Image (cartoon, rainbow, N blue to C red):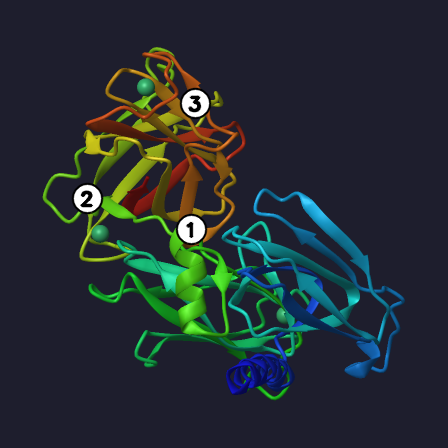
C-alpha cells in the first residue's frame, strides 16, 4: 500500500516538476515562421504556445494573423494542423514516439508566439529555414562538428535602425566573436574554431545594440552551412539533437605550401592574336586563414567580347564519397557564375549548381554535391563520387559586359561525407 502511494506521489511530483519548468522558461519570442525540433519520448510531450499580439510591443500597427501550428514527422509529413487564436495560450501534445524528432511549424504571421516545454528541443536555424526572433536572442547553444575550423552565424534585420549586437561564445563561455551591426543585409559573424574546440557545443546571443539610435527587434538568424542548423537553450539538448545531423568536415586544401597544385585553362580558345590571361598560384596578399590563399587572376583584352569560362583544376584530393564541398571565396560582386565540378576516379563528372559572385570580400560557399541541383555525367555513371582521389574544378563563367579583369582568392577547401 505504502509502495503504491509513493509511486503515485512520484508520478504527481514528476508532472508538477514538468509544469514548473514550463512556467519558468518561456522561450524565444518568435514571428513569421520558425521550426521547433522536439525530441519525443515514451509519453506525450506538452508544448505550451503563448500567442501575443504585435501591439504588445508596438502600438503603431495591428495584425489580424492568428497562429497556425503544424506537427510534422521527420520526413516533413504533417501529422496534425492546429489553428490557434490570437492572444490565447494553447498546449499542443507531441505524441509519444520512438522517432528521433518531431518538428513543430510555428507560424504566428505578423504577431508573436512563444513556446515553452521541458523536453529536449531546439529551434531550426538554417539558410532555408531561418529562426525569426523578436527583441533579441537569449543564449542558445549549437554543435560545431569535428573538423570545422571556421564557421559563421548569420543575422538579417532588414529594417533600417533595427539592429543588434551578436555574440558567439566558445564552449568554456569565453567570447569568441562579436559584431554590432544594422544587419540590413544578411551578415555573417565569423569565428575561428581552434583545434580541439571542434566537436563541442558553442553558443550565440543577440543583444541590444550600444548605439543609441539602434534597437533590437525583428531579426532572422541562421547557422552557416557547415554547422547543423539547430539552436537550443540547453547545451546537452543541442548536442543530442545535432549529433545525428553533424557531418565531419575535412580540409583538403589550405594553400599553405609552395605549390598551389592548381592549373587553369580557358574553356574556349580565343581568336588568333588575342590573348586571355588566366593564372593560379599561392598568394600572401589576403589569406582567409593561415599565411596563404589560392589566387585566381583573369583578364580579357579590350575588344574581346565573347563569353568564356576560366577553369581551375586542383590536384587530386582524397574526397571519395564526398557529398558537400565548402570553401572560402573572396568575391568581387561582378555577378559572374561560380561553379564547382568534381571529377571522380572513374571519370564521372558532377556539375553542382552555379552561384553568382554577388558578394565582395570573403564568404563561405558550400555546395551540395548530392543535392537535386547537381548533374552527373560521363564516367561509370554510378552517381557515386568514387575515390580514392577526386579532382575539384572551380569554374568562373565570364559573360560579355562583365568587368574585364578580376582577382579572386580561394582558401580552406573542405569536404564532408
Ligand atoms: Ca536593420
Ligand atoms: Ca590558407
Ligand atoms: Ca562514379
Which mark identifies residue 245? 1
Please give the name of the residue rendered at 23% of the width and 26% of the height, measured from the top-left corner.
387
- 334 vs 254, left or right, is right
Q: Which numbered disc, 1 or 3, marks the residue closer to the eye? A: 1
Which mark identifies residue 387? none
Q: Secondary structure at mark 3?
A: strand
- 73 vs 201, left or right, is right
Front residue (pair 265, 6): 6
Q: Secondary structure at mark 2?
A: strand
Front residue (pair 403, 111): 111
Please give the name of the residue rendered at 31% of the width and 46% of the height, measured from the top-left corner.
409
Query: Where is residue 69 shown, x and y percent of the image?
Result: 75, 59
Q: Please indicate, yes or no, whether residue 196 appears anywhere in the rendered image.
A: yes
Q: Earlier in the sequence, mark 1 or mark 3?
A: 1
Q: Are marks 1 and 3 in contact (CB under 8 Å)?
A: no
Q: Are marks 1 and 2 in contact (CB under 8 Å)?
A: no
Q: Is residue 202 above or below residue 210?
A: above
Q: Which residue is mark 3?
A: 308
Name the quadrant of the C terminus: top left
Crowding at mark 3 (Cα within 10 Å: few <14, some 14-19, many 20+): some
Q: Find the residue positioned furthest to the front.
A: 1
Amino acid at each position: 500500500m505504502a509502495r503504491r502511494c509513493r509511486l503515485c506521489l512520484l508520478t504527481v511530483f514528476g508532472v508538477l516538476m514538468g509544469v514548473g519548468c514550463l512556467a519558468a522558461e518561456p522561450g524565444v519570442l518568435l514571428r513569421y515562421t520558425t521550426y521547433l525540433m522536439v525530441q519525443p519520448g515514451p509519453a506525450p510531450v506538452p508544448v505550451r504556445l503563448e500567442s501575443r499580439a504585435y501591439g504588445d510591443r508596438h502600438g503603431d500597427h495591428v495584425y489580424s494573423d492568428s497562429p497556425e501550428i503544424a506537427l510534422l514527422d521527420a520526413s516533413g509529413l504533417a501529422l496534425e494542423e492546429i489553428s490557434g487564436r490570437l492572444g490565447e495560450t494553447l498546449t499542443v501534445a507531441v505524441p509519444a514516439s520512438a522517432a528521433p524528432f518531431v518538428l513543430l511549424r510555428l507560424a504566428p504571421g505578423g504577431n508573436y508566439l512563444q513556446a515553452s516545454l521541458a523536453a529536449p528541443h531546439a529551434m531550426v536555424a538554417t539558410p532555408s529555414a531561418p529562426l525569426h526572433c523578436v527583441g533579441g536572442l537569449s543564449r542558445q547553444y549549437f554543435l560545431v562538428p569535428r573538423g570545422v575550423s571556421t564557421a559563421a552565424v548569420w543575422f538579417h534585420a532588414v529594417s533600417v535602425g533595427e539592429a543588434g549586437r551578436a555574440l558567439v561564445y566558445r564552449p568554456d563561455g569565453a567570447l569568441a566573436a562579436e559584431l554590432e551591426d544594422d544587419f540590413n543585409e544578411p551578415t555573417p559573424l565569423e569565428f575561428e574554431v581552434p583545434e580541439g574546440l571542434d566537436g563541442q557545443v558553442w553558443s550565440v546571443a543577440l543583444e541590444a545594440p550600444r548605439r543609441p539610435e539602434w534597437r533590437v527587434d525583428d531579426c532572422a538568424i541562421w547557422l552557416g552551412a557547415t554547422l547543423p542548423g539547430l539552436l537550443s537553450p540547453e547545451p546537452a539538448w543541442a548536442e543530442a539533437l545535432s549529433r545525428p545531423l553533424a557531418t565531419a568536415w575535412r580540409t583538403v586544401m589550405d594553400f599553405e605550401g609552395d605549390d598551389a597544385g592548381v592549373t587553369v585553362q580557358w574553356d574556349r580558345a580565343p581568336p588568333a592574336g588575342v590573348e586571355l590571361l588566366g593564372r593560379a598560384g599561392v598568394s600572401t596578399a589576403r589569406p582567409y586563414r593561415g599565411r596563404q590563399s589560392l589566387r585566381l587572376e583573369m583578364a580579357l583584352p579590350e575588344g574581346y567580347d565573347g563569353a568564356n569560362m576560366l577553369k581551375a583544376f586542383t590536384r587530386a584530393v582524397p574526397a571519395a564519397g564526398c557529398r558537400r564541398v565548402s570553401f572560402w571565396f573572396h568575391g568581387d560582386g561582378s555577378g559572374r557564375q561560380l561553379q564547382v565540378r568534381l571529377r571522380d576516379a572513374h571519370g564521372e563528372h558532377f556539375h553542382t549548381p552555379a552561384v553568382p559572385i554577388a558578394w565582395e570580400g570573403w564568404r563561405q560557399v558550400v555546395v551540395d554535391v548530392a543535392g537535386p541541383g547537381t548533374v552527373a555525367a560521363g564516367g561509370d555513371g554510378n552517381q557515386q563520387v568514387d575515390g580514392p582521389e577526386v579532382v575539384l574544378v572551380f569554374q568562373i563563367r565570364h559573360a560579355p559586359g562583365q568587368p574585364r579583369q578580376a582577382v579572386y582568392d580561394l582558401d580552406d577547401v573542405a569536404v564532408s561525407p
